[in-house]
Amino acid sequence: MSTNLAQLPLHALSARLKSRSISPVDIVAACLERITKLDPKLHAFIEVYDKEARLAADAADKAIRSGHAVGPLHGIPIALKDLIEMEGRVATAGTAVWRERRCTRTATLAQKLISAGMIVIGKTHTVEFAFGGWGTNQHLGAPWNPWDAKTHRTPGGSSSGSGSWCGITGLKTTIGRISTYGVLPLSPTLDTPGPLTRSVEDAALLLQVMQGADLHDPRTLALRDADPLATLRRGVKGLRLARMSAAERTDVAPEVLAAYDRSIDQLASMGADIVDLALPRSFRDYGGASGRIMSAEAYALLSRIVDNNDLPIDEAVRPRVRAGAAISSREYLEVLAERERLKGEFAAATEHVDALLAPVTMTPAIPLDTIDQTTTPAIFTRWVNFLDLCALAVPNGLTPSGLPLSLQIVCRGGDEAMALRIGWAWQSATDWHERIPPLAQ
């Protein structure tokens, strides 16, 4: 079986399944073959459901051939981050302390994907408790960034096994768009799941399935379902897209800025109106407030674990969680109130633009042995959750040494359709998302 199937985007697989030119059995076999071949090096998966995935593929094949396909995703495999619970399966949240913990429930988003006919092929690694942006994990191992065969570089976190620093497309959804029920929490105020895919169209297809009201997560009741496919192909002509201020460019790697500036020019040539925008606060200011909420809530959830020095907790993660012990209840309530004020302030400053454009990271992936674990690479991303926005990351270039770079499209809360629309236009005009890393060829 050719492994090329494992490199196709979801929407292309869906089209081939519909034409009956391939079967779910073919796709799952190709993916499992790739995992067997590459994962000893990449270390992306914490568990692979080989036998179960093959059985599910056979059942999906029979259903599709008998005219009982349940939708465009039926028979397509998906991997879940190791925070997402599935009854009877292990969900470690990236900690060796929970390596044998068995789930007693299935997350709502997993139920939705399975109901759409998708086949869960395994679980991917995460930073311990999902608390870190570099993608490292001291006890369960850090996945290998596939864009450098010789040097172990940061894969990106917290979804390190899915490779969020590895030239893929990622949708950060508005809080409440997708239920967090059954997703092991870090910061209940700020947690929000979303798809990591090969293309924007794939992200839109998955969003359609994953979103929706869930009584187990009351925040989902406040958002009406989006229809990301309805406006996906409308282009960017006439949209007002804001570039980040000159002050935010400080300390950003030159190759990141060069790719960012080229992206701005490309979108302008496609008809977008590029405007300058001065935000009332810096990305770092928003991110600092976000960090206080995360630490306070993480410590409330995990204090019994991280305060036990006999347990094998990542030396970089333990102090991040323990920092929450120093945040009083008064300070915590104050930062929550400050968040509401800052959300209104930001909304007023951006009311005349459709999206804000920024890089995803300040540097390309760096070698693991050069990481300063007291810092965060999430300067350009952490504030999105804090301000209750949504964002899309799309590949936008390669460094001279061949490392992927990405553009972030930040939109108003609840407006994932706009972010996907801009991203789809970008990927229709570029092919960065089609590049294959050296270790996957």
Image (spheres, rainbow, N blue to C red):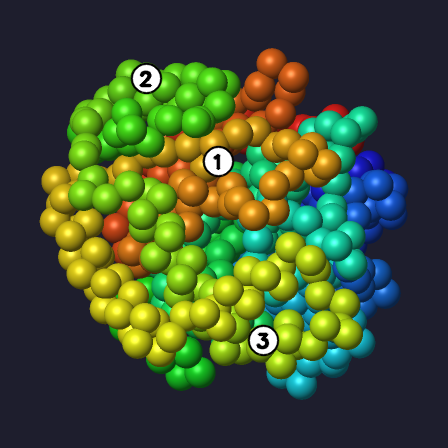
User: On the image, which quarter does residue 221 sit in?
Assistant: bottom left
Q: Quadrant of the C terminus?
A: top right
Image point (64%, 75%), residue name:
307
* Front: mark 3 or 1: 3
Badge 2 density bin: few <14, some 14–19, many ≥20, Cα 10 Å:
few
* Front: mark 1 or 2: 1
Image point (30%, 76%), residue name:
330
The Cα–Cα distance between marks 3 and 1, rounded to whole angstroms, is 28 Å
Please, what is the three-letter code of the amino acid marked with disc 1? Thr
Q: Relative to 360, does residue 297 appear above or below in the rendering?
A: below
Decide which of 316, 198 is in the foreground and name it: 316
Decide which of 367, 106 is in the foreground and name it: 367
The Cα–Cα distance between marks 3 and 2, rounded to whole angstroms, is 46 Å
Kind of element beneath mark 1: loop
Decide which of 20, 46 is in the foreground and name it: 46
User: On the image, which quarter does residue 215 sit in?
Assistant: bottom left
Disc assigned to residue 265: 2
Image point (57%, 19%), residue name:
399
Residue 146: give x, y in percent of width and height.
72, 34
Decide which of 30, 22 is in the foreground and name it: 30
Please, what is the three-letter code of the amino acid marked with disc 2? Asp
The residue singled out by tag 3 in the image is 302
Kind of element beneath mark 3: helix
